[in-house]
Amino acid sequence: MSFTYDERIDGALPPVDREALIAALHRLSPTMEVLHEPERLRPYECDGLSAYRTVPLCVVLPETVDEVCAVLELAAKRGVPVVARGAGTGLSGGALPLEKGILLAMSKFNRILEIDASAGIARVQPGVRNLAISQAAAPYGLYYAPDPSSQIACSIGGNVAENAGGVHCLKYGLTVHNILAVDIVTIDGERMTLGAASLDSPGFDLLALFTGSEGMLGVVVEVTVKLLPKPQCQKMLMASFDDVETAGNAVARIIGAGIIPGGLEMMDNLAIRAAEDFIHAGYPVDAAAILLCELDGAASDVDEDLAHVSELLASAGAVEIRIARDEAERLRLWAGRKNAFPAVGRLAPDYYCIDGTIPRRELPGVLKGIAALSDEYGLRVANVFHAGDGNLHPLILFDANRPGELERTEALAGKILELCVAVGGSITGEHGVGREKINHMCVQFSSDEIEFFHAVKAAFDPSRLLNPGKNIPTLHRCAEFGGMHVHHGNVPFRELERF
C-alpha cells in the first residue's frame, strides 16, 4: 500500500493505532527505548525554534544501526511518518515532531569510531557533539573546522542535515566541504554509503545532494569527516565603527583586497551591549557596530595580513582598532560572539532568529532596510552575522504573551527574507528551511524548480514519510501564499525604493 501526504499534514494524517504501533516497536528490540508517556514526550516537542511545538506520538531511541533499519522498515510498512532528531539545537523547526508520527532520536549514537591522523579523517556516529570531534583530534594536532555557535551541544548528524557553518566557514567552508562520506538508512530500512573516504568517488555526487536535505531523504548513522591541522598562528583584531553601514562597507574592502580571514563577524550596538553584559568580553558598548576579524596560518603571513587589514579598516572608517594581546583575550572576544544569541535573549521575553544570505556588496543597503523594517513593525532587531560570507542572523525581540506580537514578528521575518532574495541572496545560509521558511521557498524558487525538488524527494522517499511538512512546499501552498511577487531577485521597484 502506498501512502502519500500533502506537506501541510497537521490534522490531515490518517489515524494511527498508537498502542499497536508502540507494541510493535517494543517487539523490534526488547532493549530499545520507546517513550510514550506524556511527561516523557514533552521535552521533544520542539527544537531550538520554540515558537512551534508539537508533542510526538512516541519517541524511539535506538542504539544500533539494525534498530534504526527495523524502525524505518516498520514505519514504511504501516505508513507512519518519521522525523529524525539530533541534539535539538536547530533553529528552523526542522526537527519538529508530528502528533501522528515517530520521533527517531539519535542521541545514543554518540561514539567516535575512529581517528586516522595520517589520513586526516575521523569516523563518528551522528550523535557526537561537534566540539567533541575537535577535542578528540586535539592530541594529534588536528581539528574539525565547522564551528556553529551551538558547537558545544549540536550533533554532527544535525550539522549534516542542515549543512551547518559557523564563524570560520568563510575560509574553511560549511559542513558539505568538510565531510567525505555518510552512511544513511533509507525509509525502507536499507543502508547506503554516500561518498567515500577518498577525495573522490564514482557516480553522481549524492553526498552533496544529501547534505542539507534536513532529514527528508534518509537517516544518518555514520559520518566520515575531514580533520585539518591546527593553524600555526591565530590572531584576532576588533574594529569599532560609529555607523553600521560603514562597517558593512569595510567588509567588502577586506575581501576585495584578496584577504580571506579565518573568521569575519559583525555585531550591531544592540547585540554588542547584550553580549558585553553577558560575557564581559571587552566590547566597546558605545560603538554602532564592531567587526571581529581573525587571521590564521603561518606566523609571518598572519603578521603581514594583520597589518594590511588594520590599514584597510582604518581607511574604511574604523574609529578604533584593537588587536587581542594574547590567546585568552582572543578566546574572550570569540566567546562574546558565540554567546550573542543567548545574550540577546536576556533583552526580551522571546526572540526570533532569522537566517538569510546576501551578496557582500549588498550588506550596507540590507542593514539599512532591516532598520527601516524594524521601525515599521515596531520591533527591535539585533544584528549578529557572518559578515565575510554575507550570512545574516537578525534577532527580532518580541513578547509572545502579547496578542498578535508573534504574528507581527513572523511577518517582519518574512519581509527580511524577501529583502535578501530581492538583492540576489537566499532565504537561508545554514539554519535550513524546516517548517519556519517553507512559505518563502515560494519566494525563492519557481514552480518548475519546486517540482524538481519534489522529484528528488520521491526518488529517495516515494511515500513521503521522512520528515513530511518541511522544506519543500506544494505549488498549491505557493499559490495561496502569493509568493511569486518576488522571484530570483526581481521585485517591483516600489518595494525596493522604500529602503
Image (spheres, rainbow, N blue to C red):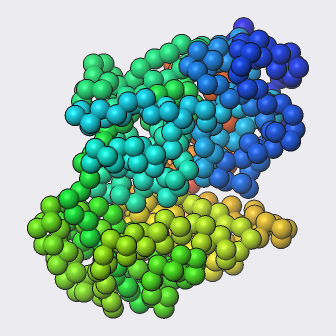
Q: Is residue 36 left or right of residue 281?
A: right
Q: Is residue 410 left or right of residue 415?
A: right
Instruction: Residue at the far top: name it.
Output: 1
Q: Picture coordinates of residue 186 (x, y %)?
A: 55, 19
Asked which quadrant contains residue 62, the reply is top right
Quadrant for residue 372, please give it. Answer: bottom right
Residue 478 place in picture, x, y as percent: 63, 43
Q: x and y percent of residue 237 in the render? A: 30, 77
How many labels were placed on the picture? 0
Eyeballing the image, is 157 above or below 487?
above
Q: Residue sitting at 45 percent across and 49 percent down?
A: 131
Q: Which residue shows up at 61% across the image and 25% down it?
A: 63
At x 59%, y 39%, the residue is 86
255 over 88 or under it: above or below: below
Question: Where residue 11 sits in the image (x, y, percent)?
Answer: 84, 34
Q: Nearer the viewer, residue 371 or 254?
A: 254
Q: Is residue 359 above or below residue 63?
A: below
Closest to the observer, 473 or 177: 177
